[in-house]
Amino acid sequence: MGKLNLEALPHEWFTIGGSVAFFSLALITVLAITRMKRWKWLWNEWLTSVDPKKIGIMYFLVGGFMLLRGGLDAIMIWLQQALSVGGSHGYLSADHFQQIFTAHGNIMVFFVAMAFVFGFINYIVPLQIGARDLASPFLNTLGFGCLSAGS
């Protein structure tokens, strides 16, 4: 694994708590889909769909999830600034604060704003022009897959 070892991973309480919460939510989601036997339905009806309305809804879902993620970064930034009074330097190191600040900006621009814009385009434009689909439905699905993989 190269230079990556256990000491290289962050050990702060908020990082561990966030990671545990994220993996717990992912595990609960996977177990729920498995228990309801909806994997084939999810794949056939949603993830490989070329319907622009479904793709728009999926963009909104990814954008909403990333909005929560960026919102947590904003809360961490606000909390750090609120706790940095007088001789106290807050609960984050300067390097970690810069990482969270940069991640917050990137997430909110590239994964929230762009996801909502593309969601509106996919959902509303075909309705406005009276078309049943957009010009390149497969590329539309591929674009959503690339955004999801990037987030």
Image (cartoon, grey):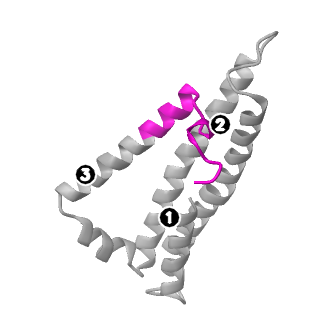
The location of residue 17, given as percent across then percent down, is 48, 31
Residue at the image position 52 percent from the left and 71 percent from the top: 144
Which amino acid does the dot numbered 2 rest on?
Ala
Q: Which of marks 3 and 2 precedes in the sequence?
A: 3
* Up/down of 131 relative to 146, above or below: below
Residue at the image position 51 percent from the left and 79 percent from the top: 142
Identity of the residue furthest to the top in this view:
87
Is 3 one of the magenta-colored residues?
A: yes
Gap in Å between the C-alphas at discs 1 and 2?
22 Å
Q: Which image quarter holds the N terminus?
A: bottom right
Of labels 2 and 3, the one closer to you: 3
* Up/down of 92 relative to 20, above or below: above
Residue at the image position 48 percent from the left and 86 percent from the top: 138
**Residue on which disc 3 sits:** 31
Q: Give residue 37's quadrant in the image.
A: bottom left
Q: Which of marks 1 and 3 precedes in the sequence?
A: 3
Residue extent of the magenta highlight = 1-21
Which amino acid does the dot numbered 1 rest on?
Tyr
Of labels 3 and 1, the one closer to you: 3
Front residue of 22 and 138 = 22
The location of residue 75, given as percent across then percent down, is 62, 32
Identity of the residue furthest to the front in this view:
2
**Residue on which disc 2 sits:** 74
Q: Which of marks 2 and 1 precedes in the sequence?
A: 1
**Residue on which disc 1 sits:** 59
Label 1, secondary structure: give it.
helix
Residue at the image position 30 percent from the left and 46 percent from the top: 28
Identity of the residue furthest to the bottom in this view:
135
